[in-house]
Image (cartoon, helix red, strand yellow):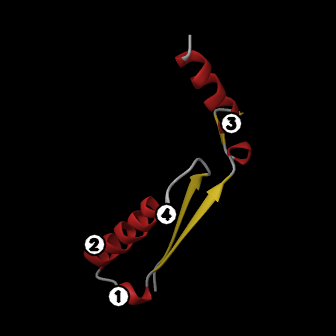
Amino acid sequence: MPYINIQITREGATREQKAELIRGATDLVVRVLGKDPQATFVVIEEVDTDNWGVAGETVTVLRQRQRATRST
């Protein structure tokens, strides 16, 4: 019984995009591992960018810097 946990930052993934992630992850474990799709669970967790860090900074700060760089 596979359990797949996908964590993404909360930055506006659409319902359709999430559905595609669920379908794709399920299809992958069916194809690669031969698992039953009816017994495959996929959970998508959306994490606030203040709670996700990369290279010692929050994603919020990194995104703000990227936007400032693009607007100059």
Residue 44, position as x, y percentages in the image: 55, 66
Q: Secondary structure at mark 1?
A: loop
Occupied quadrant, residue 36: bottom left
Q: CA distance from mark 1 to mark 2?
A: 11 Å
Which residue position holds label 3?
60
Disc 2 to disc 4, C-alpha distance:
26 Å
Seen at 63% across and 23% down, the residue is 65
CB under 8 Å between callouts 3 and 1? Answer: no
Q: Which residue sits furthest top?
A: 72
User: Does the residue at mark 4 contact the one at mark 3 (Cβ under 8 Å)?
Assistant: no
Q: Is residue 58 left or right of residue 4?
A: right
Tell me, yes or no, whether the two marked residues, 3 and 2, touch with CB atoms within 8 Å.
Answer: no
Q: What is the C-alpha distance between the residues marked 3 and 1?
A: 38 Å
Residue 15: mark in rendering: 4
Mark 4 lies on a secondary structure that is helix
Q: Is residue 9 visible?
A: yes
Question: Earlier along the polypeptide chain: callout 4 or callout 3?
Answer: 4
Amino acid under label 4? Answer: Arg
SS at badge 2: helix
Mark 3, secondary structure of its residue: helix
Between circles 3 and 1, the one closer to the viewer is 3
Measuring from the top left, give residue 56's x and y in whole percent. Answer: 70, 33
Where residue 50 appears, as percent x and y from the top left, is 73, 43
Q: Earlier in the sequence, mark 3 or mark 2?
A: 2
Residue 58 visible: no
Residue on which disc 2 sits: 32
The structure residue drawn at horizontal position 39% and vertical position 68%, both measured from the top left corner, is 25
Q: Which numbered disc, 3 or 2, marks the residue closer to the eye? A: 3
Select label 1 or label 2 by which is in front.
1
Which amino acid type is marked by label 3?
Thr
- Going from N to C along the chain, the mark reached first, 4 or 1, is 4
